[in-house]
Image (cartoon, coloured by chain):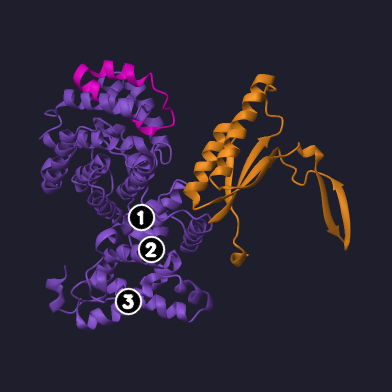
Amino acid sequence: MGDVAAAGKLDEAEVGRIFREESGRSVAALIRVFGDIDVAQDAVQDAFAVAVRKWTGDGLPPNPGAWITTTARNRAIDRLRRESRGRELLGEVAVLSPGNNDPGGPHEEGPVQDDRLRLIFTCCHPALSTEAQVALTLRLLGGASTKEVARSFLVTEPAMAQRLARAKHKIKAARIPYRVPEEHELPDRLRPLLAVVYLVYNTGLTSTTDPDLCPEAIRLARILATLMPDETEVAGLLALLLLTESRRASRTRPDGSLVLLGEQDRRRWDRALIKEGQAIVRQCLRRNQPGAYQLQAAINAVHADATTLEQTDWPQIVALYDQLLAVAATPVVALNRAIAISEVQGAAAGLALVDELDLDNYHPFHATRADLLRRLGRNGDAAAAYERAAALSPTDAERDFLKQGGRGSRWANPTTHLLERSRPAAGMEPL
Amino acid sequence: MTHYLLSVHSVEGEARDPMTEEEMRQFMERVGVLEGEMKSAGAWVFGGALHDPDTATVARVSDSEVLTTDGPFAESKEHLGGFYIIEAEDLDAALAWASKTTAAVSKPIEVRPFRHVSEA
């Protein structure tokens, strides 16, 4: 990359953007070399200061990623030489061995390519809280500043700095390993990792202040899909995010209020994202190792095929929800299945299933009941259910929507059940 | 290598039927197998079960005099029931031992790393 930009000079914002995209790779490589997250982060930060000075004057180097890693590595060595403990650390580090310090050389060949994968498995280690996992992933792999991470969590920058420091301290003190888990550990270890990427996406989707998190999550999912081509659930997550992203621009009005799937202008859906997402879903189907993310992606792929809500292949969606319920038997999946059933067998059949569920604190439950009751002509009961849903709604946009009686539309939520425990209403996707 | 404390926590007054003789025998056997495994893997440093907290005594310095009082120190319902100190390559290895320990004793196990001398 960079061939085009190399000719011209860059402004500081452009340097920042390129740096952010490349820095996760460099941080990961330097953690492997120095065995210390803080040393790696400080070094990459130093390299950024040099990049702002040099790139704005001389243009982009031919291989910015390699340039950052080499510059940061040299800065780290300079820094460590000045400190007595650093000199001890350097004694143990292979970085000084000849041939390993070749500026502009081939960028991270062989096993080194897995550095980012090692790093994300460390960041998403189950010994860390979900919040720490997300914060570390955004900060170290996503190249986000502490300030940006703080904004995503709606906390102050010093508070986030403290949480990140605590998490990094735990990694170091408890020796959370910096390695890709072995094959037999992967299913357990992959779960939090995918949940973190999904949570990053959904935080962006529901946030009015931080929409950059959506492309960031997709970028992370793409990295994971490239690094773990054999894991179908990783592909499934990427497909799910791409298909959800294809509708993001049409799911809110300029005032921030939500537009339900049935009312969205389907011509505004991003066909390129849909095409890419559906192609991945087809690959997953051929590999026939279904999992929760792949099935949700498949459901979204079916929706993407329909030119109107009425033309949706609801029997197909019911069949996919049946499968999803088999691998992820949660009440929220059951709720969404009930909605699909109501499209095939009618509102009464849907309501019977909905009323069996124990989801009293989950606002889409009440919104769904309200809609089904309205369709059955039970307007008094419907109004009470809309009121209950509005009272529980987490965002203003959803609350306003529900207070207006849902504008007579159908409500469902195909993308949230995996987060049920950690984040009850993230990613609300009204259908 | 890092040393880890694997501690077994008991909750005071937690309703629990006393073990039958047979259950106790099986329990001791499971623990014996676990400890044997720790030793042969080179992970074992030290370990043991503690008497109830009402057997504890606390010594503290007050006005440069040592005061001895009837324990326990912490007025909490949860008490340390026993512990292992193990040596392990990293947290994953320590957690593997913790998983085996919790399976053997049917109680939650807390895993904490020891400070290295240089970190102290």
Secondary element type, mark 3? loop
Q: Is residue A327 left or right of residue A14?
A: right
Q: Residue B54 appears at what percent x and percent y?
A: 80, 38
Could you say which disc has been placed on residue A98 in the image? 3
What kind of residue is marked 3?
Answer: Pro
Taking the image as drawn, is residue B20 in sight?
A: no
Secondary element type, mark 2? helix
- Residues under labels 3 and 1: Cα distance? 25 Å
Q: Nearer the viewer, mark 3 or mark 1?
A: 3
Q: Residue A220 appears at what percent x and percent y?
A: 28, 53
* Camera-nearest residue between B7 and A93: A93
Q: Residue A336 appears at what percent x and percent y?
A: 29, 28
According to the picture, the residue beneath numbered tag 1 turns out to be A118
Looking at the picture, do discs 3 and 1 lie on one chain? yes
**Magenta segment:** A339-368
Q: Which colour is chain A painted?
A: purple
Q: Residue at x 34, y 43 (%)?
A: A183
